[in-house]
Image (cartoon, rainbow, N blue to C red):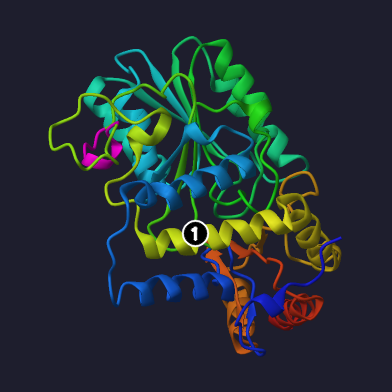
Amino acid sequence: MLTNQRSLFALPDDLRYLNCASRSPYPMATMEAGKAAVERMLVPVSQPPDEYFAKSEAFRDKVAELVGCSADQVAITPAVSYGIGIAAHNWSLGPGRTVVVPEGEFPSDVYAWMAACERTGASMVTVARPADGEDLAARWSQAMIDAIDARTAVVSLSTVLWADGTAFDLTAIASRAREVDALVVVDATQSLGAAPFPYADVQPDLLLCSAYKWLFCPDQFAISVVGDRLIEAAPFEHHWSNRAGSQDTTGTGLRDTFRPGARRFDVGGHSNNVTLSMANASLEQVLAWGPGQVADYCTRLMAPLLAHLKSSPYAIPGPNDHLGHIVGIRHDDVATRERAMTEIAKRNIRVSLRGDAIRVSPNVYNTPDDIEVLIEALDAALR
């Protein structure tokens, strides 16, 4: 059983940081790895070309272990929007075809599909959030399944909704999408690292993740895991390092073929020694904890909060509607929500207000005391 990991971070004692869904603090080991890489650049020394790619290959190996895919499927990208572009640039749309997304999906997962639909004459199908109540996530997942038909070309959604943590039944939705030969695009930004991802069950054509949240990586660092139907698609960026034989700098000619697998989709300049050093240190730590252990820790940590709020005027999701590391707390009254955010800030607690939900997202550095003080703040807003 995983115990509290706060000693691995430099968080101030008086800060109750319950906002990992916004961005993570760096573990101290990540900071040290970045610092060492910067110091090496004070006197840059030429490195063999094979060494230039070594850290990016180490990163791919760690992602493969985390996800349960092949390292050859992993592309290093700067953002989820870049990864979405891989699919939107290549997948065939046209009049009469549809792209299915849930209502309230993160904008970076939607804009490229909107543009593709406008360009090709396809249509967006936005599946409305059902009325609040029991089994909301199951009802919304079923609505997604019902929206998929012979016209569907793409189904694009997140593992959990960014604003409040609603958890979709990815396996069932992806299974229905495959029945109609629709592309399955999944954004795991708000869960990868904090919960196991059932890659073999979902079989996404494209799995995306911005890594500066639950994976503790630097900004402008994201992952695209590319499935068989896109693995040989055309990249929309061309540079020297995604071409086969790039490591052989004794040759000066142009190269016609790409490096194997998803490496063709790597962003130019991805082999940044500083950011890759930090990312590798972070993933090493996440793998040491294990996503299942992180999920268990956060679930146990949040249990007193959810139990307390169950009989309060606040609305919380049901136990099957969210994962343990992220939850949206609602109140119908705007003034009460504003008072709650004020009381929370007074106690030096960090959470996010997303839409009408107070989003709470702890990680392994949080303590039961953090949760007790949050409960105190929420109760104070009701008085």
Residue shown at 68% from the left, 46% from the top: 132
Question: Could you say which quadrant of the image residue 124 lies in?
Answer: top left
Residue at 33% x, 29% y is 88
Would residue 214 be visible to someone looking at this image? no
Can residue 44 be seen at all in this image of the molecule? yes
Nearer to us in this view, 370 or 229: 229
Q: How many marks?
A: 1
Residue 92 in picture, x, y percent from top left? 33, 17
Give the answer, above or below, for where 184 lies relative to 77.
above
Residue 238: say if magenta: yes
Percent across and percent down for residue 205 are 50, 26
Give the x, y percent position of residue 224. Answer: 45, 39
Q: Residues within 10 Å of mark 1 (few under 14, many from 20)?
A: many
Residue 277, position as x, y percentages in the image: 46, 62
In-image side of 273 versus 192 (left or right): left
Residue 262, image quadrant? top left
The quarter of the rendered structure image containing the C terminus is bottom right
User: What residue appears at the point 52 percent right and 64 percent down from the top-left corner?
Assistant: 22
Q: Amino acid at mark 1?
A: Ala
In what element is the residue under mark 1?
helix
Residue 227, relative to residue 338: is it above or below? above
What secondary structure prevails in the magenta region? loop
Task: Answer with the quarter of the image where residue 118 lies.
Answer: top left
Residue at 50% across, 49% down: 59
Closer-to-camera residue (308/238)? 238
Q: Is residue 356 magenta?
A: no
Magenta range is 236-244
**Quadrant where the N terminus lies?**
bottom right
The residue tagged 1 is: 279
